[in-house]
Image (cartoon, rainbow, N blue to C red):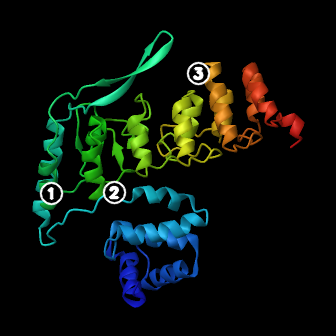
């Protein structure tokens, strides 16, 4: 890699000539030099510039190079970001296309996909029968979007992250529509051309919540949509407007399959409830997923016990305290969840009195 031009281009990107960062050229040069010197955070930030083409020529191979270096040093976000690298090369777009044309094509792309939103690709299902489960298939339904037509919109300058209206009082975008269709070849095409798998969509109306695609599809069973998103770099530590990380929310509701999936893709088992972004939500107790499972009134014992076992397997701190000073064992005892109490004690959990803190 040619050092001097890269430093200049990166400095320009980080100086605010690209829309992502707004720091000085000197700071941009420092990031590059720190990445070369082996600092993981700088390697991650440099990889992200190459991934997005911010100030430097977009290069998935260079993004992978720098993300990999940071990931080898234990940088969790860099490790997840490796899944953001597209499977295929982006389509060429004429840089001289004016903004008005880009906006027009963005709307046309969204409207084209929205008209076909009821399409469902052929998919496998598990049919539960007495004695055993059988695999089956559901045939494709509706009319599939034409990948060549979508490619033409992209080449003409369409913004694949354009957000439009849908009929359920939510905003939507091309990637959300593709994932909902379970048309993953279309989703791959959109991601390769810049669709943000971690985009936040807005709910219309008075409340105006925001949510990630992973959050939106966390209750769609089977969890094929959520799995696709995680495989392509969705953030498993996404925090809802309410302040709940997805893992804490899933644990509280006994969603053992989703908890297992989040942990598999790198969710932090000890991430705590944070301050809500929305004013109409009250701050929580700073609980972890394990504490939330132990305190839950939203799920059955077997599901909560399965969730707790998964969290413990992924090294959750069994004695982590919530803001009120209570431990997960305190809450399991208070809720009279005997099975959960046994699991926690076997993992070394103590009550707040026993720990003497």
170 relative to 128, above or below: below
Question: Who's the residue at 77% across and 25% down the image?
Answer: 341
User: Pointer 2: what residue?
Assistant: 87
The kind of secondary structure element at disc 1 is helix
Q: Nearer the viewer, mark 2 or mark 1?
A: 2
Q: Is residue 91 above or below residue 160?
A: below
Q: Secondary structure at mark 3?
A: loop
Sooner in the amino-acid sequence: mark 2 or mark 1? 2
Can residue 211 be seen in the rendering of this structure? no
Residue 70 lies in quadrant: bottom right
Q: Residue at x 36, y 39 (%)?
A: 208
Residue at 33%, 76% (x, y): give it: 55
Q: Residue visible at 89% across and 41% down? A: 356
Q: Nearer the viewer, residue 231 or 293?
A: 231
Labels 1, 3: front one: 3
View extreme (bottom): residue: 4
Q: Marks 2/3: CA distance?
A: 39 Å
Secondary element type, mark 2: loop
Whether residue 194 sits left or right of residue 84 in the image: it is: left
Question: Circle 1 sits on which residue?
Answer: 103
Residue count near mark 1 (Cα–Cα under 10 Å), binned few <14, some 14–19, many ≥20: some
Tell which of 207 and 23 is nearer to you: 23
Label 2 crowd bin: few (<14), some (14–19), many (20+), radius 10 Å: few
The residues tagged by marks 1 and 3 sit, at their Cα atoms, a distance apart of 46 Å
Whole-percent x and y of residue 260? 56, 37
Q: Is residue 162 above or below residue 29?
A: above
Mark 1 or mark 3: whose residue is earlier in sequence: 1
Marker disc for residue 299: 3
Image marks 2 and 1: residues in contact by CB distance under 8 Å: no
Residue 44 horizontal/vertical position (percent): 50, 68
Q: Is residue 127 visible?
A: yes
């Amino acid at each position: 890699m040619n050092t001097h031009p890269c430093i200049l281009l990166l400095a320009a990107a980080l100086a605010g000539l690209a829309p992502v960062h707004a720091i000085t050229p000197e700071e941009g040069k420092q990031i590059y030099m720190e990445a070369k010197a082996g600092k993981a955070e700088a390697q991650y930030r440099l990889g992200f510039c190459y991934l997005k083409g911010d100030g430097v020529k977009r290069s998935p191979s260079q993004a992978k190079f720098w993300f990999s270096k940071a990931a080898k040093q234990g940088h969790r976000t860099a490790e997840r970001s490796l899944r953001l690298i597209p499977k295929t090369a982006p389509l060429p777009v004429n840089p001289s296309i004016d903004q008005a044309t880009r906006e027009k094509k963005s709307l046309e792309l969204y409207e084209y996909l929205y008209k076909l939103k009821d399409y469902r690709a052929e998919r496998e299902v598990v049919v539960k029968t007495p004695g055993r489960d059988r695999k089956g298939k559901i045939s494709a339904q509706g009319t599939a979007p034409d990948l060549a037509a979508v490619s033409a919109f992209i080449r003409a300058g369409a913004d694949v992250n354009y957000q439009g209206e849908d009929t359920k009082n939510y905003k939507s975008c091309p990637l959300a529509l593709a994932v909902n269709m379970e048309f993953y070849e279309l989703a791959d095409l959109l991601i390769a051309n810049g669709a943000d798998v971690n985009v936040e969509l807005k709910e219309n109306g008075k409340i105006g919540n925001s949510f990630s695609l992973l959050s939106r599809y966390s209750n769609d069973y089977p969890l094929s949509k959520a799995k696709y998103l995680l495989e392509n770099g969705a953030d498993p530590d996404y925090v809802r407007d309410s302040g709940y990380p997805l893992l804490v929310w899933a644990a509280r509701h006994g969603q053992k399959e989703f908890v297992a999936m989040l942990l598999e893709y790198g969710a932090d088992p000890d991430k705590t409830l944070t301050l809500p972004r929305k004013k109409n939500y009250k701050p929580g107790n700073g609980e972890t997923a394990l504490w939330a499972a132990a305190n839950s009134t939203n799920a059955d014992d077997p599901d909560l016990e399965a969730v707790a076992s998964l969290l413990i397997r992924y090294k959750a701190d069994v004695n982590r305290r919530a803001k009120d000073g209570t431990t997960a064992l305190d809450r399991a005892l208070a809720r009279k969840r005997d099975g959960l109490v046994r699991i926690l004690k076997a993992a070394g959990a103590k009550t707040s009195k026993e720990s003497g803190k």
